[in-house]
Image (cartoon, helix red, strand yellow):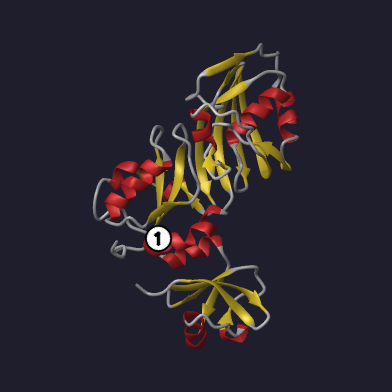
Amino acid sequence: MGRRKPSPVHGVAIVDKPRGPTSHDVVARGRKAFGTRQVGHAGTLDPMATGVLVLAVGRATKLVPWLTAADKAYEATLKLGVATASLDADGEVVGEAAVPTLALEAVREVAARFVGTHPQRAPKVSAIKVGGERLHAKVRKGEAVEAPVREVRLDALEVLALDGDTLELRLRCGKGYYVRSLGRDLAEALGTVGHLTALRRTASGAFGLDEAVALAALGGPPGPPLLSLAEAAGRVLPRLEATEAAEVDARHGRPVDPAAVEGDVEAAESALVRGGELIAVVRPGERGLQVVRGFPRP
């Protein structure tokens, strides 16, 4: 098998995913638009969900671990009284329960208990892997499987409105947080069941809806404009400006003298740049700044 053809373009695109397509569908559109198979995304959005999906193109795919680690912001609609298999409107109804009389302030008091770090059980219909296989694939095959419980972080949760059996929510959370699970758990804490009827990601780290392009923009070459690797990395990592000597050392994988860069060299990880070009992601080490991942020139 021959070597993969190098990508003709490199950078990051922010797409406003509509309801319906999977995140992989959006990646496939990106591959067509940018003329390369080197396209990945930084955080799955379910088919029902809309909003910010960050696409990494070409050498930017090497940034995906840092892009994915960014905090996320969402707006969600939770319908009480009806439970579904997928915890959202795309799943079959699996249960119903009466909805108690609720007051907005009382709901807000209950919601406040979810803010912080706590264990969360993932939805059974999810992309999380169990035994090397996606959980949703195991469920489709009829396997009896327990959804894993993981430590997650919820930084903020606002109950914007209560209209009968429907809640409007706004939240900010860390990597790996399932808003569908929050809907299930909040409904249970309110004495009923529930599922999400709408979910919109309004931000992924420093990437927001205000700069997102419609999926139609991925209709074909040349595709929408891309953020450079240096700009994208600088939004998720502290930035260090390198001298020529620091660049040479980093490009050869050698430790970089902290005195040869400008910026906070004590940060856990940083983006090393020079002349608007991303050179490497580095971290402090015993002999200077160690290269975690290099970004060779095309």
Q: Give the residue at the far top of this rendering.
A: 98
Kindly tell me whether residue 162 is visible in this rendering. yes
Residue 193 vs 36, above or below: the answer is: above
Kindly identify the amino acid type of the residue bearing the numbered disc 1.
Answer: Leu
The one nearer the camera, 106 or 43, is: 43
Query: Percent position (x, y) of residue 11?
Result: 39, 61
Q: Residues within 10 Å of mark 1 (few under 14, many from 20)?
A: some
Q: Decide if residue 267 is on the left or right side of residue 11.
A: right
Disc 1: which residue: 227
| Residue at 65% in and 70% down | 267
| Residue at 29% in and 61% down | 1
| Residue at 60% in and 45% down | 176
Query: Percent position (x, y) of residue 165?
Result: 61, 17
The quarter in which the C terminus is drawn is bottom left
Task: Describe the element under mark 1 as helix, strand or loop.
Answer: loop
| Residue at 28% in and 64% down | 2
